[in-house]
Image (spheres, rainbow, N blue to C red):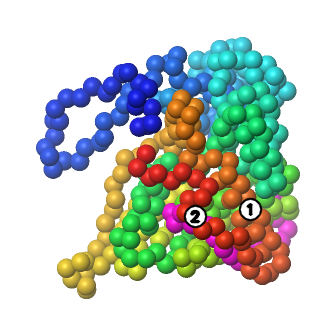
Amino acid sequence: MSGIASTRQDKAETRPPFVGESERRSPIEPPPLPHDRKIGFAVIGLGRLSLDSILPALASSKLGRLAAVMTGDKAKGERVARQYGAPQDAVYGYDEWTRLGENEDVQAVYIVTPNGLHHEQVLAAARVGKHVLCEKPLTNTSAEAEDMIRACANAGVMLMVAYRLQYEPHNREAARIARSNQFGGLKIIEAHNGQVQGEADQWRHDRRLAGGGSLPDIGLYCLNFARFVTGEEPVEVSAWTWSTPGDARFAEVEENVSWQMRFPSGVVARCSAAYDAHESRVARLHFQRGTVQLDPAFAYKGLRLQVQHRSAEREDVELREEHVLDEANQFAAEIDHMAECILTGRQPATPGEEGLQDQRIMEAIYRSAAENRPVELPHVAQRDAFRDARLSD
């Protein structure tokens, strides 16, 4: 949160260290803003992700707080507002955007609804002048994504996509290693995300609401990971999708997807996502002189990063090391980043354009699978063309 250091008068109290120089120390964290100076967020949608992860993250956020909720179940909204200390009159239905816009205690909304609703809700938030943090994927089509970016720009509000892993220490460390040339050139990326889906009547199996199956839901983590760690954009994709015949869960959306991306530097990413396979969320980076593994790579907590490489002193000795990093609440980290951007005027590190690029690549993946051929993508020469990847922030 270095970007707001100059705007905060209160400083973290420092004392002489009580551990020796050789002991590992955590960095000094600045204290949270006073409650009345935190950015007020309205959480749009009170499904499992909001209840289990986002609302608790707001409660622990240093720069953000819960100011309102929007839900189709007012009684549920009132219970949540009481639990988290939000005003009882700050509970809104999905048709009350105008009233939400009149609430000056709300500076931003966090949209946590099914993918197919993101487009209309982002446009509504922009119309009433609220900054937007939107869950991934940004929406169902690149045309809708362009519309959302344009609407927010015209309204003068920020649009940030909730790519939580770009704010997570282990993924950031993997990106740092990939760009450092520490183990020579990066050659191959492998990334897989799999889980077993529940019953057929949930919204993720409805194409209109989900936009697709395993690709936009969990495969997107693999796609965005490959782009993030390299800083490059793929120039070609080849893909395959398949589903178990007769399984009602996959009547409208794909069960499995596997694809390969070729990057300008020659790096190849081999990715897959599965909707009916034992939970596994792993990523590997294969370099000239070493391998970096994240396992789990895409989970909410418990991430681990291991490095395997040859000893510099003895070529016949293989070293295995684990990089032990502080675990961060990924949702609180992205909320704090969004709040910092609002406080300082800095553009979000994962703006709408980052979500749009992923949407374009997913459309190319689906086209490749449908036409059974490689699909070329426009060449993007600039690194980190759609994000701010300052890894030290």
Q: Residue at point 85% right, 27% down? A: 95
Callout 1 crowding tier (Cα within 10 Å): few <14, some 14–19, many ≥20:
some
Q: Is residue 304 above or below residue 3?
A: below
Q: Which residues are magenta?
A: 229-249
Q: Nearer the viewer, residue 141 or 44?
A: 141
Disc 2 on helix, strand or loop? loop
Q: Is residue 93 above or below residue 255?
A: above
The disc label shown at residue 382, or none:
2
The disc label shown at residue 306, or none:
none
Residue wearing tag 1: 360
Place of residue 279 in the rendered image (x, y in percent of width and height, measured from the top left): 59, 61
Q: Which amino acid is tagged 1?
A: Arg
Residue 361, located in which quarter of the rendered image?
bottom right
Q: Are marks 1 and 2 in contact (CB under 8 Å)?
A: no
Residue 114 shows in this picture? no
Residue 85, located in which quarter of the rendered image?
top right
Residue 178, located in which quarter of the rendered image?
bottom left
Disc 1 on helix, strand or loop? helix
Place of residue 175 in the rendered image (x, y in percent of width and height, measured from the top left): 46, 61
Q: Which amino acid is tagged 2?
A: Gln
Q: How many marks?
A: 2
Specify whether residue 246 is painted magenta: yes
Q: Residue at point 52% right, 16% down? A: 36
